[in-house]
Every structure is written in C-alpha cells, then in structure tokens.
Amino acid sequence: MPMIGNIEDYFTKGCGRCDRFDTPDCSAALWRDGLLQLRAICQAAGLEEMVKLGQPTYVRNGRNIAIFGAFRNDFRLTFFNSSLMKDPHAILEKQGVNAKQADMIPFTDVGQVAARKDIILAYLAEAISYADAGIKPVKVVEEQELPEELISALDADPELAEAFHALTSGRQKSYILNLNSAKQSATRVTRILKFRDKIIAGKGALER
C-alpha cells in the first residue's frame, strides 16, 4: 500500500502504511481532532507543512522541526534535534526504553493539546530559533554508522525508530550491511520501506 503524498489525506484517511488506511479504525482517524489542533499550533508557529514518509512534517527553511505520529493508545508531537531542547517543563519523553533522547510530547486525551498549547508553542519557538541560527546537535559517534537514508527514515518514523533501537546489535548490523550494499540512494530507500514490517516485528534482515 503506497504512503500518502498529500497532507490533507493524512487528516481524512491516514498515512497509508497499513490496512487500516481510510477506515474508522485508522489511528489518525481515532485522534483526528487532536491532530488537527496540533496542526493549527504548528501553522501558528509559522512552520511550513509537508508530508514525509506518510506523516505531517513541519519545516523551517529546509530544516525539519517536528513531526506527527498517531498510534492506537496515543498521538505524538516529536521534535527533530531534540538533544538541543532545554525542556523546562519536563514534558519530553523517550520513544522507548532503548531510545537515547527524550524527543516527543505524547497525548492520551485530545484535551491535553489545548491545555499545553502555550508550552507547545514555546518549544516550537525554541526549536525554530536553533534552525534560524544554524545550530545543530553535536554528532555522537556510533559504533555502527547508519546509512543517511536510514537515519532520515528513523527521524521521520517514531514507531520505526523505537523498534530499530530495540533490536539487538546483530540485527541492526544486518540491516546496515544490507542497505550499504546498495549503490543507489533510491534502492536504499526502497529497501527500508520493505524492511519496515520486519523491523517492527523485531526481526533481522535475513530472518523470515
């Protein structure tokens, strides 16, 4: 099933990454009112809206600022480059136990969005200030160097990132080796899309 490319489709049909797409059971449909409120806040912050890997992504001068995610039990606003964030209200949480950085604000009730509107705007303003100043996080040297396409996919897909970081180092390496064996970037992107279900299932690239 192809992922959406039109931003409006996300709010009316979902992301297009599973068979619940365009049904009342879609996570984006379940949390539609809250997602629309988050959308309005991001727009009020002056961010450009686009779709990346089927999810609404908010950008400032070509630099990713935040992205939405809708799941069965919650919906989330996730910040890129979150290691720069000061988080004075201590509301940023990690995507999972193996995540290195707290980067998302989760919502389990639509009313939480309005209640946190001023805080969300302040956090977006902080992230925008780093983008405008050209400030980027200090790169951490990883034991295994991830392909750029995989890094982009993990940044854009919180569920995928959580699952990938939960894999054993051997399973992570199996994907890295497979992706690095592809000569073209487009091939690596295609492989990542095909691998997504396996990664979510906790399997390595060669496992069935």
Image (spheres, rainbow, N blue to C red):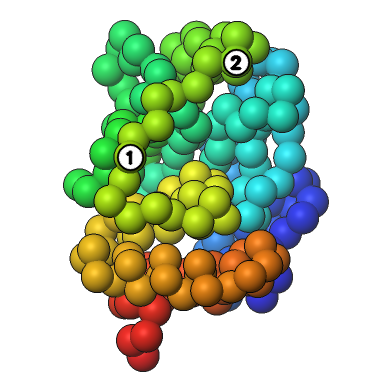
Q: Secondary structure at mark 1?
A: loop
The dot on residue 89 is none
Residue in view at x 39 percent, y 45 percent: 74
Q: Residues within 10 Å of mark 1 (few under 14, many from 20)?
A: few
To which residue does mark 1 refer?
141
Res 115 → quadrant: top left
Residue in view at x 72 percent, y 59 percent: 4
Residue 109 image position (x, y, % from top left):
40, 36
Residue in view at x 31 percent, y 22 percent: 91
**Marks 2 and 1: which is nearer the front?**
1
Res 67 → quadrant: top right
Residue 39 image position (x, y, % from top left):
64, 30
User: Which kind of residue does numbered mark 1 sit on?
Assistant: Val
Q: Is residue 25 above or below residue 80?
A: below
Would residue 5 appear left or right of 3 to someone viewing this image?
Answer: right
**Residue 40 can be seen, yes or no:** no
Front-most of 42 and 165? 165
Q: Check the picture and name the quadrant holding the C terminus.
A: bottom left
Would residue 165 appear left or right of 178 to someone viewing this image?
Answer: left
Q: State the separation of the CA atoms marked 2 and 1.
A: 21 Å
**Residue 86 can be seen, yes or no:** yes
Res 38 → quadrant: top right
Q: Earlier in the sequence, mark 2 or mark 1?
A: 2
Residue 129 image position (x, y, % from top left):
57, 9
Would residue 10 appear left or right of 92 to someone viewing this image?
Answer: right
Front-most of 81 and 103? 81
In the rendered structure, are the residues bearing label 2 and label 1 in contact, judged by CB atoms less than 8 Å apart? no
Would residue 124 appear left or right of 145 to someone viewing this image?
Answer: right
Q: Is residue 57 above or below residue 73?
A: above
The dot on residue 134 is 2
Q: Check the picture and name the quadrant holding the N terminus.
A: bottom right
User: Which kind of residue does numbered mark 2 sit on?
Assistant: Gly
